[in-house]
Image (tube, helix red, strand yellow):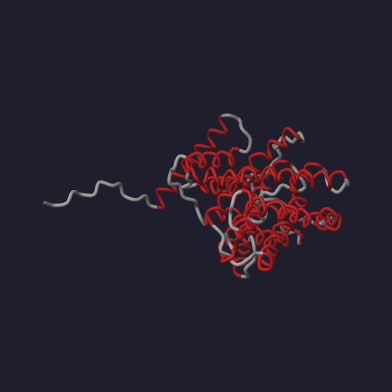
């Protein structure tokens, strides 16, 4: 008797999964716009994809496409680095001096928290606590023998909560309307400048990757665009349409980080990440108050400079809040640079070998 044909559904292709992801993200944008909620192009895709992921939908991120759109934010930062901003860099030295102390405080509290309270191994605890770039901490932690899934969920939770809560604090705590003009329409920017921005994005991104630059998709375009800006060849940020597209793909990237999550991971890993964000919030508040009371930064800039989110997300918030983009990003670059260069080196001296792990 012939075997019954296999009735199981055909596996979803990456293309169909990405189409579903894009449709859910677009639906999130439409819903947030209809309800008049803030930052619909960021939060609509974020919460739409997050909800679908928690419902076990097989979403799929956009890989290099998403990375490509992140270059727009690097160009936006670079275009903001005018001669006036560069001249003001020495005045930032005093507040920048608090960044290493901030990182040390996070490590002293965060590593024991993840290891002793939640039972993660020391390597995973170390890289879960470090407030560096999401992808960098996952890669370094995995190479050192940590748990990549736990690191991914913990850092995704950190970024998601900070990106969600920061606008609320900016609105109700500092009175910021988050309605600052994100950029001129493309039709109002000279075509030559648009071409120069596109070239800066591509050359900076791929050139940065070739030389091993950390955060190449943002830092590379930022450096190339800053040179063009300081040379007087660029006088505007990327067009509003490009900034909105970057927000759209950032929101998707955060939301799809929870695809395939289990109830056990929610209870153990995500909950650990949520509580850790509360710890970070306390530390960020302390350091923000210090720099503000010392007269080293206005409240909004101080808050955004010490909020331990990702470079891309903090760039978006600084733009819509009308904050000093140069001040905010210089502090985040200092934090990420110190973590990326210092965390692996410190781990070699402070972390035991895996055979010593419980």
Q: From this viewpoint, which residue is outermost toward the right?
A: 294
Q: Considering depth in this image, is 113 or 297 the residue closer to the camera? A: 113
Q: Quadrant of the C terminus?
A: bottom right
Task: State whether residue 137 is above or below residue 286.
Answer: below
Image coordinates of residue 283 in percent, x first then y, are 75, 46
Q: Residue at x 70, y 46 (%)?
A: 280
Q: From this viewpoint, which residue is outermost toward the bottom?
A: 211
Classify residue 175 by image quadrant: top right
Q: Residue at x 57, y 34 (%)?
A: 32
Classify residue 343 by image quadrant: bottom right
Image coordinates of residue 285 in percent, x first then y, are 77, 43
Q: Considering depth in this image, is 326 or 6 the residue closer to the camera? A: 6
Q: Residue at x 59, y 65 (%)?
A: 356
Q: Considering depth in this image, is 39 or 257 the residue closer to the camera? A: 257
Q: From this viewpoint, which residue is outermost toward the left?
A: 1
Image coordinates of residue 76 in percent, x first then y, are 68, 52
Image coordinates of residue 190 in percent, x first then y, are 66, 52
Q: Is residue 297 left or right of residue 268?
A: right
Query: Is residue 227 visible in this depiction of the protein?
Result: yes
Query: Is residue 75 visible in this depiction of the protein?
Result: no
Task: State whether residue 77 is above or below residue 208.
Answer: above
Q: How many marks?
A: 0
């Amino acid at each position: 008797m012939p075997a019954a044909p296999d009735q199981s559904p055909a596996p979803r292709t990456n293309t169909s999964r990405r189409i579903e992801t894009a449709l859910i993200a677009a639906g999130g944008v439409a819903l947030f716009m209809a309800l008049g909620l803030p930052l619909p192009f960021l939060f609509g895709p974020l919460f739409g994809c997050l909800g679908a992921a928690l419902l076990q939908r097989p979403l799929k991120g956009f890989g290099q496409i998403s990375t490509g759109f992140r270059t727009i934010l690097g160009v936006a930062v670079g275009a903001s680095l005018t001669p006036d901003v560069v001249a003001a860099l020495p005045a930032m030295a005093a507040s920048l001096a608090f960044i290493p102390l901030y990182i040390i405080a996070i490590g002293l509290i965060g590593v024991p928290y993840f290891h002793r309270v939640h039972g993660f191994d020391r390597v995973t605890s170390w890289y879960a606590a470090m407030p560096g770039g999401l992808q960098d901490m996952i890669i370094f932690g995995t190479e050192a023998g940590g748990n990549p899934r736990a690191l991914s969920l913990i850092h995704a939770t950190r970024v998601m909560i900070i990106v969600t809560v920061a606008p609320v604090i900016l609105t109700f705590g500092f009175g910021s309307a988050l309605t600052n003009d994100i950029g001129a329409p493309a039709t109002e920017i000279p075509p030559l400048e648009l071409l120069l921005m596109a070239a800066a994005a591509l050359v900076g991104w791929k050139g940065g990757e070739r030389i091993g630059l950390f955060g190449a998709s943002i830092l590379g375009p930022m450096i190339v665009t800053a040179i063009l800006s300081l040379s007087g060849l660029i006088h505007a940020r990327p067009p509003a349409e490009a900034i909105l597209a970057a927000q759209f793909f950032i929101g998707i990237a955060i939301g799809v980080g929870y695809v395939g999550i289990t109830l056990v991971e929610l209870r153990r890993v995500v909950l650990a990440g949520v509580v850790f964000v509360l710890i970070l919030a306390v530390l960020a508040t302390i350091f923000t108050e210090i720099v503000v009371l010392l007269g080293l930064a206005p409240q909004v800039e101080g808050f955004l400079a010490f909020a331990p989110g990702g470079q891309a997300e903090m760039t978006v918030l600084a733009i819509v809040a009308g904050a000093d983009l140069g001040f905010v990003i210089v502090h985040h670059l200092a934090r990420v640079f110190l973590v990326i260069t210092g965390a692996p080196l410190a781990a070699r001296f402070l972390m035991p070998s895996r055979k010593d792990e419980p």
